[in-house]
Amino acid sequence: MGANATPMREMAVTGNACLVGLIGRDIGASRSPSMHESEASAQGLRLLYMLFDFAQRGWDVADLPRLLAALQTVGAAGCNVTYPYKQAVIAHLDALSPQAEAVGAVNTIVFSGGRATGHNTDVSGFGEALAGGVGNRPFARVVQVGAGGAGAATAQALLRHGVRQLALFDVDGARAATLASRLHGQFPDREVTVGGDLPAALAAADGLVNATPMGMAKLPGLPVPAECLGPHLWVADIVYFPLETALVAESRRRGCAVINGSAMAIGQAAAAFTLFTGRPADRARMQASFDRFAAARAA
């Protein structure tokens, strides 16, 4: 990567404006700019958070290295990465944090000392969501739909949180099998299966995680059949724009305990903010910023 990148902590200490951003597709409704810029302002920092929407700009995965090099050249502190580039971006980085290496996906890149280092704050962000949302409900058997970059992180968080049996479903069976193999190596005492009878798996499960983009404005719909949802399940959706996805709404209607995408979004953003600026984030302030954004869009 380029040698002209400005170390992130130097930017924070000298008071220079900190440039960061988000790489993804169809990300116009992202709340990340609001959360990061408001938190920086509260801490007396100047931070600009840009959206690099590949769909809007007509870019594709081949444009990733060009964008990363440009961000380093102009002295950006780093950037977040979302669907569908959390795994594709790895080939263009100089190093991975232990967390990102374990997950095999990156959602945060830090530019420092002429190097681009990939991190993953999705695992801790989803772990916080689970800790705050599941409570004392059963947690042994979980069905997860989606085995891409986000799914790799949520699967890690689930197994670290104590899930004993994890059933992975994905439209790309090979991708699910690759993730299952990685997880078997890291959690040899857990049972990780791929595919099979989805309705039967949900009937026997304690929880369901949607780690696909299904439910976003551009991809409306349910990731599982509605009739498979019921009070025996807790349901977690990682999609947060819109916050009230079809899955969240239908799960509530059918009596499920529900975790929407807000907790994970705030948790991963707070950890990313610290990586970008070298300063801890106030999660309560970021939650307030998240809520204000939601209220403004609803008005």
Image: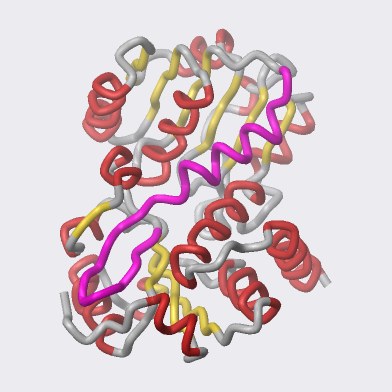
Span shown in magenta: 108-136
> Picture quarter containing residue 64?
bottom left
- Reply above or below: 196 against 20: above
- The residue shown at (37%, 38%) is 152
> Picture quarter containing residue 4?
bottom left
- Tell whether position 288 is magenta: no
- The residue shown at (31%, 72%) is 111
- The residue shown at (52%, 36%) is 210
> Picture quarter containing residue 44?
bottom right
- Reply above or below: 130 against 51: above
- The residue shown at (51%, 79%) is 49
Colouring used for the render: secondary structure
- Please tell me which residue lies in front, 111 or 25: 111
- Please tell me which residue lies in front, 141 or 29: 141
Quadrant (top left, top right, bottom left, bottom right) of the N terminus: bottom left
| Residue 231 percent location from the top left of the image | 74, 18
Tell me: 176 left or right of 93: right
| Residue 110 percent location from the top left of the image | 34, 67
Tell me: 211 left or right of 106: right
Quadrant (top left, top right, bottom left, bottom right) of the C terminus: bottom right
| Residue 234 percent location from the top left of the image | 67, 25
